[in-house]
């Protein structure tokens, strides 16, 4: 009897299941498509979550050197031991960003516009600049001179802070500056009937403008008294192909002009040209068009050779060149993922096992990619193996440049510094 009931029950259940299956088949043909289920599980990566060895509040942008971190807080410059975050010294009042370290000295702006030079080892004042410059937004020490930027360039003696000159150009300049020999190269944009870029050369000894050249990007190379700059399309000199000009740094005159046409555009047939973004790395010129990067030998005639082409093999859309070459790879991102392409064999490296969210920024240091994400996670990924190494949770969404000093990594978030030891496997073999 018991066996019969069991068999009966099983039969009823089978019948019910059949009805359910029939019902599901019918409903599937009228799918409303109002839902989507994807990777609906908590993201887990095979890397330990670490805590910072120390963290502290700060303002502006930090600088590092001599085993220390230098930063601003409440108008003072503070130096801490980078290994443990303990304060070593503090200096001044009413000081403001930027803070810059170079060769044993620290340079910082003040609310009055006078730069202070401080001994990095002790926090003792070395000098205060003899002339103020309001609204300084960058400080660059170079050789025996210190330069400040506020739309104009001011030069001081790096030895004693004595004012030397202010440039004689009436329009504001961008901060980006190139030093080469006795010249300083700056850039700005002028607006009239249309907006165009201008390069300027200034005499480093006097600050007087020597020449200007219109319709160029900022130089991508400087060597033996010459500059290499990319020509820009303009109303009067259409340059539909990627064009690199060599300029005499003393006069600004064009000594040589080379066009790169990796897309094989036939201008004689009326095909539209296209400018790529060009740069020089080592003995090669690279030209980028979104996801494709083309490489040419620096001194070769590009019309007589086939360039090497690098592009990540991925199925996700929107990946564009982002960084490199670095450690033999070009790096690409679409803001959600990261891929590398090896220069030696063009194979694609997938770094996404360590990516957890939208990418705020990433920095390449040693053998590692330090990926700061808007979910507050900093993921550290090995450049060679693509393995996630560690994760750091910050609860922040905005990040500055990741720094390396004395074997410690410093993460800059908005208002807080966090530090941890550089993973041993990511230390570069290059000294």
Image (spheres, rainbow, N blue to C red):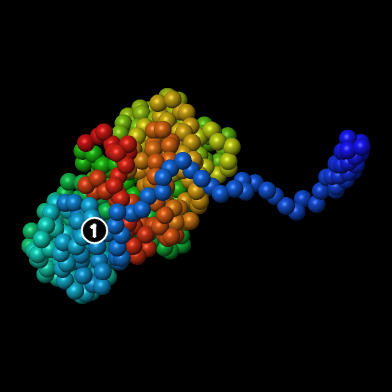
User: Could you say which is closer to the camera, residue 315 or residue 8?
Assistant: 8
User: Could you say which is closer to the camera, residue 179 or residue 312?
Assistant: 312
Q: Quadrant of residue 92?
A: bottom left
Tally of numbered tags: 1
Q: Position of residue 156 (x, y in %)?
A: 14, 62
User: Could you say which is closer to the camera, residue 64 or residue 52?
Assistant: 52
Residue that mark 1 sits on: 85
- Dividing the image into 4 quarters, which one contains the N terminus? top right
Using a 10 Å C-alpha cutoff, classify the residue at mark 1 as few (fewer than 14 neighbours), some (14 to 19) or many (20 or more). Answer: some
174 on left or right of 153? right
Q: Is residue 284 above or below residue 83?
A: above
Q: Position of residue 110 (x, y in %)?
A: 21, 71
- Residue 205 in view here: no
Q: Is residue 157 above or below residue 347?
A: below
Q: Position of residue 60 (x, y in %)?
A: 30, 64
At horizontal 36% and vertical 53% (from top left) the residue drawn is 51
At horizontal 75% and vertical 54% (from top left) the residue drawn is 34
403 on left or right of 106? right
At horizontal 22% and vertical 52% (from top left) the residue drawn is 83
391 on left or right of 104? right
Q: Secondary structure at mark 1?
A: loop
User: Could you say which is closer to the camera, residue 108 or residue 245?
Assistant: 108
- Dividing the image into 4 quarters, which one contains the C terminus? top left
């Amino acid at each position: 009897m018991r066996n019969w009931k069991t068999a009966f029950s099983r039969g009823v259940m089978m019948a019910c299941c059949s009805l359910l299956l029939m019902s599901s088949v019918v409903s599937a043909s009228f799918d409303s498509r109002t839902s989507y289920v994807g990777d609906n599980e908590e993201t887990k990566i095979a890397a330990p979550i670490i805590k910072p060895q120390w963290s502290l509040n700060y303002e502006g942008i930090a600088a590092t050197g001599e085993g220390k971190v230098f930063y601003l807080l409440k108008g003072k410059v503070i130096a801490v031991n980078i290994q443990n975050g303990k304060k070593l010294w503090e200096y001044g009042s009413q000081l403001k960003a930027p803070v810059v370290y170079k060769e044993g000295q620290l340079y910082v702006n003040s609310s009055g516009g006078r730069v202070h030079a401080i001994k990095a080892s002790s926090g003792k004042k070395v000098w205060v600049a003899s002339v103020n410059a309001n609204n300084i937004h960058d400080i660059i020490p170079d050789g025996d001179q210190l330069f400040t930027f506020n739309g104009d360039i001011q030069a001081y003696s790096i030895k004693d802070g004595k004012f030397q000159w202010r440039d004689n150009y009436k329009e504001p300049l961008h901060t980006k500056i190139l030093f080469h020999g006795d010249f300083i190269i700056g850039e700005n944009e002028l607006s009239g009937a249309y907006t165009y870029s201008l390069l300027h050369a200034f005499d480093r000894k006097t600050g007087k403008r020597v020449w200007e050249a219109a319709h160029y990007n900022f130089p991508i190379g400087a060597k033996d008294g010459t500059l290499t700059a990319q020509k820009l399309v303009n109303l009067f000199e259409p340059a539909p192909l990627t064009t690199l000009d060599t300029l005499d740094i003393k006069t600004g005159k064009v000594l040589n002009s080379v066009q790169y046409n990796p897309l094989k555009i036939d201008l004689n047939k009326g095909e539209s040209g296209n400018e790529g973004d060009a740069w020089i790395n080592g003995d090669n010129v690279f030209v980028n068009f979104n996801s494709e990067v083309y490489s040419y030998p620096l001194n070769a005639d590009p019309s007589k050779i086939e360039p090497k082409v690098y592009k990540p093999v991925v199925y996700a859309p929107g990946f564009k060149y982002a960084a490199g070459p670095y450690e033999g790879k070009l790096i690409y991102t679409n803001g959600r993922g990261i891929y590398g392409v090896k220069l030696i064999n063009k194979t694609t490296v997938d770094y996404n096992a360590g990516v957890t969210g939208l990418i705020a920024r990433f920095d390449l240091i040693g053998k590692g990619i330090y990926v700061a994400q808007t979910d507050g996670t900093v993921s550290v990924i090995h450049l060679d193996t693509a393995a996630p190494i560690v994760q750091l949770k910050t609860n922040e969404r905005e990040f500055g440049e990741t720094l390396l000093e004395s074997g410690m990594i410093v993460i800059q978030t908005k208002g807080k510094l966090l530090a941890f030891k550089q993973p041993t496997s990511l230390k570069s073999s290059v000294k």
